[in-house]
């Protein structure tokens, strides 16, 4: 068995990552959403989380587009990162929906739940809307990242995960204030905790 050396965090390298994060946070090249629009979406997503509308949950092990019922009765729609791309783009374009508007959009199956549906998923999907090229940030050479991690980090079935955890996941998943973009060819930069923390610090100061 080949043994690799134990990783030791380099403070010098970590400081360089933080410097990169600071520079990208303040860069005029970084697309961002106006503060007043971001505040509207924060309120909308919070209201949505506490309503009886379905929650969109990102979970790789689920069938995307399938609606399941939580043990507390709340409807859950399994998705990939497509709803987050949709919410960021809508906010970036300045769209401001009411909760009633969101209800109508969901009923019309207008929120994308997957980049592309697998043939094995199609018969189980209650919602079938996929991300179009026009809506895809990747097609514009950008990667959508989250400041606060949204990973559920559990093998539990969605219906068994406490509802308050799912609500928090949903809020962090869809709030544009928890999103930032990096150029697609720098995609890995958006996963660095140092970069995410520096983006978060900058956004809180805005």
Image (cartoon, rainbow, N blue to C red):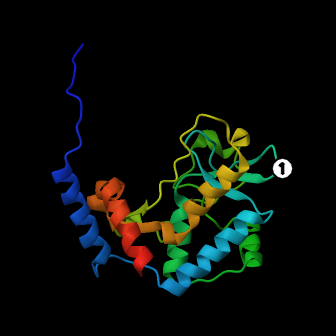
20 lies left or right of 81:
left
Is residue 135 something that shows in the picture?
Answer: no
Q: Residue shown at 58%/38% (left/top)?
A: 61
Q: Relative to residue 175, is residue 101 drawn left or right?
A: right
Q: Is residue 142 left or right of residue 6?
A: right
Residue projecting furthest to the right? 73
Can residue 78 be seen? yes
Residue 88 is situated, as x and y percent measured from the top left of the image, at 51, 71
Q: Indicate the secondary structure of the residue bearing disc 1.
A: loop
Per the image, the residue denoted by label 1 is: 73
Q: Position of residue 146 (x, y in %)?
A: 45, 60
Q: Is residue 199 left or right of residue 165?
A: left
Give 63 or 22, whichever is nearer the viewer: 22
Which quadrant of the structure image shows residue 42? bottom right
User: Residue 139 or 86: which is nearer the viewer?
Assistant: 86
Farthest residue in the top direction? 1
Which quadrant of the figure has residue 86?
Answer: bottom right
Image position of 204 with respect to 130: above or below: below
Between residue 109 and residue 11, name the one nearer to us.
11
At which x and y percent is residue 204?
44, 75
The relative height of residue 189 versus residue 62 in the rendered view (above or below) is below
């Amino acid at each position: 068995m080949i043994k690799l050396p134990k990783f030791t965090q380099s403070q010098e390298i970590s400081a360089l990552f933080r410097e990169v994060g600071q520079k990208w946070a303040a860069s005029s090249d970084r697309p961002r959403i106006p503060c007043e629009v971001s505040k509207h979406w924060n309120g909308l997503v919070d209201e949505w989380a506490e309503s009886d509308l379905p929650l969109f949950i990102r979970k790789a092990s689920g069938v995307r587009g399938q609606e399941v019922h939580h043990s507390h009765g709340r409807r859950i729609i399994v998705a990939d990162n497509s709803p987050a791309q949709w919410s960021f783009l809508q906010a970036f374009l300045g769209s401001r929906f009411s909760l009633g508007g969101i209800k109508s959009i969901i009923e019309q199956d207008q929120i994308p739940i997957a980049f592309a549906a697998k043939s094995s998923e199609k018969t189980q999907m209650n919602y079938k809307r996929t991300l179009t090229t026009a809506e895809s940030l990747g097609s514009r050479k950008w990667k959508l990242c989250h400041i606060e991690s949204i990973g559920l980090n559990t093998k539990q079935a969605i219906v068994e995960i406490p509802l308050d955890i799912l609500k928090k996941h949903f809020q962090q998943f869809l709030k544009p204030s928890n999103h930032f973009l990096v150029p697609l060819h720098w995609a890995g930069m958006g996963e660095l905790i140092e970069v995410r923390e520096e983006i978060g610090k900058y956004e809180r100061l805005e």
